[in-house]
Image (spheres, rainbow, N blue to C red):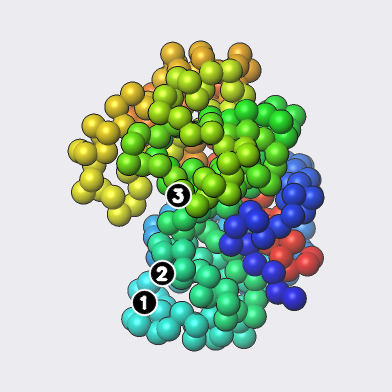
Amino acid sequence: MTRHFISLLDLSPDELNGLLDRADALKKEVRAGRYSTALQGKTLALMFDKSSTRTRVSFETGMNQLGGGSLFLSPNDAQIGRGEPIEDTARVLSRMVDIVAIRTGPHENIIRFAEHSGIPVINALTDFNHPCQLLADIMTVREHLGGIEGKQVAYIGDGNNMCHSWMIASRQFGFSLRIATPGGYRPESDLMDACSDCVILSDSPHDAVSGVDVVVTDTWISMGQEEEKQRRMKDFEGYTVDAAMMKEAADNAIFLHCLPAYRGYEVTEDVIEGPQSVVWDEAENRLHAQKALIEFLLEI
């Protein structure tokens, strides 16, 4: 049976932790200068409606390090950008490549693609969630804090796709999540209901970060929201993660940001460049976590 990775819920907690164990091993291999050829002859198609730095580079480099190949399809490169039905593109690619990663807007696009795909489909970001980023995030927490189960995490900012991803992760990895968002920027209510046993919603960033092990934020202005910048800047006043806010977290707390980061807005320069920031490890871990994911889905 073809398995997809549209959400962290597509894998069991045991599978997710096993995948991250494999990611740890792959990272050590790279550091030792050893590279697998497990994906020799395999091809990953990258279909991106939205621009990317980390996602594209990590997937392409990952396939190269495992002996496989990749091809990149922007809307200008694929017929789907000219009106070909998603279902038709899914059927055709299933006969030519081995796995596909899709970065798109509406979440329903990737659902439709997966329903008609005979090969594994990876969610490389939608407006609803970003599960590949969470694999890297949890991998990073494990590296720096020894594990995530039972920990307390604070998410500060917009109740967007990253917030949704952390909510789902709290269920799958067994940690508690405190979310602080301004009014009007709450995460989806249905997801809040589904995660009510492990997620608490707050109006106060300072209450949310008090004593936590991990502090997370994301850009206030995602792609496609640029015209809302001035309004969002005003609405998110008081939600900047600064040194004073980090002092309210646990002494050994770490700071995460999926990047790109806009210093002086969602996070200050001294925090993202400070000793509690692990964002560069987090960015690198996209590479290793996704390599393990591709191996898992291709049953290598």
Whether tag 2 and tag 3 are in contact, CB under 8 A, the answer is: no
Q: Secondary structure at mark 3?
A: loop
Amino acid type of the residue tagged 3 in the rendering: Glu
Asked if residue 210 is positioned above or below residue 52 in the image, the reply reads: above
Whether tag 1 and tag 2 are in contact, CB under 8 A, the answer is: yes
Question: Real-space Cα distance between discs 2 and 3?
Answer: 29 Å
Asked if residue 197 is positioned above or below residue 6 in the image, the reply reads: above
Q: Is residue 25 left or right of residue 44?
A: right
Depth check: 57 or 94 in front? Answer: 94
Reading the chain from its start, which is encountered first: label 2 or label 3? 2
Amino acid type of the residue tagged 1 in the rendering: Gly
Q: Which mark is residue 208?
A: none
Reading the chain from its start, which is encountered first: label 3 or label 1? 1
Disc 2 target residue: 74
Disc 1 target residue: 81
**Which residue is at 52% across, 75% downward?**
113
- Point out residue 110 in the picture as x, y percentages from the top left corner: 50, 69
Depth check: 91 or 61 in front? Answer: 91
Disc 3 target residue: 188
Depth check: 97 or 102 in front? Answer: 102
Mark whose residue sits in front, 3 or 1: 3
Q: Is residue 154 left or right of residue 40?
A: left
- Point out residue 125 in the picture as x, y percentages from the top left corner: 49, 57
Q: Secondary structure at mark 1?
A: helix
Asked if residue 77 is positioned above or below residue 5 in the image, the reply reads: below
Asked if residue 214 is positioned above or below residue 118 in the image, the reply reads: above
**Which residue is at 63% across, 54% downward?**
8
Q: Is residue 268 left or right of residue 14?
A: left
